[in-house]
Amino acid sequence: MYQPRRTSRSEFVPIRRSRYHVRIWGDPQPGQVPVVMVHGWMDVSASYQFVVDAFSREHFVIAPDWRGYGLTESPPADNYWFPDYLADLDFLLDHYAGDQPVDLVGHSMGGQVAMLYTGARPQRVRRLVNLEGFGMPATQPAQAPRRYAKWMDELKAFHRGELELRSYDSAEGVAARLMKTNRRLPRDKAEWLARHWAQQGADGRWRILGDAAHKITSAQLFRVDEMLEVYRRIACPALWVEASDDSLAQWWQGRFTLAEFHQRLASVPRLSKAIVEDAGHMFHHDQPAVLAQLIEDFLDG
């Protein structure tokens, strides 16, 4: 099994009636900017272990499990609202950084949270790294009636127990699932991740540390014009990192393309771009050393 080079510790922080699990690598040092790393949909903070191990030097890294993921304990919910992630991050930075700006790194859903947060709170972020946080396809007002109906239908399905996440008979089964999803993930890393991505229950089954309610469609339409206004207010240098595999083509089948997203990125005032070769969307697992160098070089500025 994979052996981490840098050991993390767990802390639990009260945030907005949740008991947030936060994974910490390193210790705060005078003059050192904290690096806050936020994970994506159906992922956990431990997912950044391989990148942290590949950093060339010690950093003070703060990585939370979002509400409804990992070891974070939140009040029961039957769906999740995107603005809550921004507010949770705001409270988290109050706790760990006070008035000090941080370097903010986000992957996938976490990358989109990081972009929106930095536009809303530009004074709190020194440098921003978005790792394939694409957002969602554009929507039109005419979609609203069916969207609300779909949301209510999925809520009912959730309460009938029809949206449960699959369980596994062993940690090795979880690892096999991770490797099936990501063909580049080696077995040693998959077996290590499996024990952080899932947890064994009293019945012996291994269950993903993610709330099935995350699968419910948002009742609100994705409003690109609002998002672009937030992007325009990102004041710090920002780095967009893209994998060589085109995930959007796989996910959306032409309904949302890389070209369309690159047009959105043009709204970010001080943007740099990088591509990681031989990598898919989970490139913090596929190419952690390459990604670690890109992040460090950018943060060093």
Image (cartoon, rainbow, N blue to C red):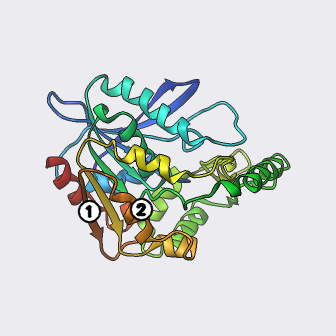
64 w.r.t. 167: above or below: above
Residue 167 x, y percent position in the rendering: 69, 58
| Residues marked 1 and 2 touching at CB (< 8 Å) | no
What residue sits right under mark 1 in the picture?
Answer: 273
What residue sits right under mark 2 in the picture?
Answer: 1
Marks 1 and 2, the one that precedes in the sequence? 2
Q: Residue at x 42, y 50 (%)?
A: 228
Secondary structure, mark 1, is strand
Could you say which is closer to the camera, residue 213 or residue 52? 213
Q: Amino acid at mark 2?
A: Met
| Disc number lying in front (1 or 2) | 1
202 w.r.t. 281: above or below: above
Q: Residue at x 42, y 30 (%)?
A: 90
Count of numbered badges drawn on the protein: 2
Could you say which is closer to the camera, residue 260 or residue 215? 260
* Quarter in which the N terminus is drawn: bottom left
Q: Quadrant of residue 280?
A: bottom left
Tag of residue 256 = none
* Residue density around tag 1, few if under 14, some if 14–19, many if 20 or more, within 10 Å: few
Q: Quadrant of residue 78?
A: top right
Residue 287 x, y percent position in the rendering: 32, 67
Residue 204 x, y percent position in the rendering: 69, 52
Q: Amino acid at mark 1?
A: Lys
The answer, for residue 286, to whether it is visible in the render is yes
Secondary structure, mark 2, is loop
**Which residue is the extreme one toward the right?**
160
* Residue density around tag 2, few if under 14, some if 14–19, many if 20 or more, within 10 Å: few
Left or right side of 14 for 274: left
Q: CA distance from mark 1 to mark 2?
A: 34 Å
The answer, for residue 71, to whether it is visible in the render is no
Residue 23 x, y percent position in the rendering: 40, 39
Q: Residue at x 49, y 41 (%)?
A: 65
